[in-house]
């Protein structure tokens, strides 16, 4: 039994003929109905494709701005964590501080990779990249400020030369009973 051909008594009510052996006209040989032009259909298709490309470009621009503003969320979290770590030098505060330094540095090193999926001729990525870099530099500045607060930055001459005495403390704060 051939595939696609009905046989009497086989129980099939219909069958599909997949081979076209007829000499009938193809759909291209048939004239278009009155009032229908193929050019207008092609223009509609091009308008739809242009709308799709514009929508995709808008989506890419929106996602690029979301990625650019993502470090802003980390700033508040990192500031809270550095505040919770305190101003004394111990393992937790050093770990938080170096995390606050390394995250922006790694983000700045990978700016091109972060914005690679959103690269398009219609999407301007310069401003989102600059915002991303600026927010990461603010995060890096917070980490450097925390290093200074902990006293781990060499800010005095005596930090570099061991023969010089350390600077005199300008202010001294103490509480309780003075012991003389």
Image (tube, rainbow, N blue to C red):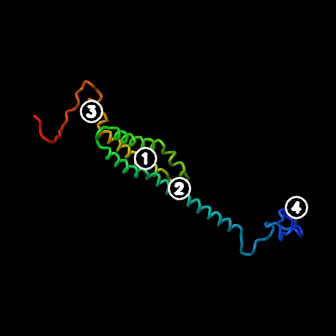
Quadrant of the rendered image containing residue 34: bottom right
Residue 94 rendering spot, x and y as whole percentages: 35, 39
In this image, 56 relative to 9: left or right?
left
Quarter of the C terminus within the rendering: top left
Label 4 belongs to which residue? 2
Name the spot of residue 151 as percent of width and height, x first: 29, 37
Q: Closer to the observer: label 4 or label 3?
A: 4
Separation of marks 4 and 2 at Cα, in angstroms: 53 Å
Q: Secondary structure at mark 4?
A: loop
Which residue is the site of mark 3?
Answer: 156
Do labels 2 and 3 touch, CB within 8 Å?
no
Q: Pointers 1 and 4 in contact (CB under 8 A)?
A: no
Which residue is depicted at the point 84% across and 69% down?
A: 12
Question: Residue at left 34%, top 41%?
Answer: 93
Q: From this viewpoint, which residue is outermost toward the bottom? A: 34
Among the two numbered marks 1 and 4 on one chain, the one whose residue lies closer to the N terminus:
4
Which residue lies at the image location 50% right of the left edge and 47% below the top edge? 114
Distance from disc 4 to disc 3, alpha carbons, whole Å, reads 95 Å
Residue at numbered disc 1: 133
> Circle 1 sits in a helix, a strand or a loop, which is it?
helix
Which of discs 4 and 2 lies nearer the camera? The answer is 4
Residue corresponding to mark 2: 60
How far apart marks 1 and 4 lie (CA) works out to 69 Å
Mark toward the start of the polypeptide (3 vs 1): 1
Q: Say which label, 2 or 3, has the lower sequence index.
A: 2
Q: Residues within 10 Å of mark 1 (few under 14, many from 20)?
A: many
Most foreground residue, 145 or 6 = 6
Mark 1 or 2, nearer chain start: 2
């Amino acid at each position: 039994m051939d595939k696609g051909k009905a046989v009497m008594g086989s129980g099939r009510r219909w069958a599909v003929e997949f081979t076209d052996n007829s000499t009938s006209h193809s759909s291209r040989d048939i004239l278009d109905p009155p009032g229908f032009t193929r050019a207008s259909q092609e223009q509609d298709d091009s308008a739809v494709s242009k709308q799709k490309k514009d929508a995709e470009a808008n989506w890419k621009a929106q996602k690029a701005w979301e990625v650019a503003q993502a470090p802003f969320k980390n700033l508040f979290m990192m500031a809270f964590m550095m505040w919770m770590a305190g101003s004394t030098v111990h393992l937790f505060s050093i770990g938080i501080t170096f995390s606050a330094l390394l995250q922006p540095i790694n983000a700045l090193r990978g700016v091109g990779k972060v914005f690679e999926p959103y690269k398009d001729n219609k999407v301007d990525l310069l401003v989102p990249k600059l915002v991303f870099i600026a927010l990461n530099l603010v995060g890096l500045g917070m980490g450097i400020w925390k290093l200074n607060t902990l006293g781990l930055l060499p800010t005095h001459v005596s930090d570099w030369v061991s023969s010089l005495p350390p600077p005199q403390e300008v202010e001294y704060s103490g509480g309780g009973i003075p012991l003389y």
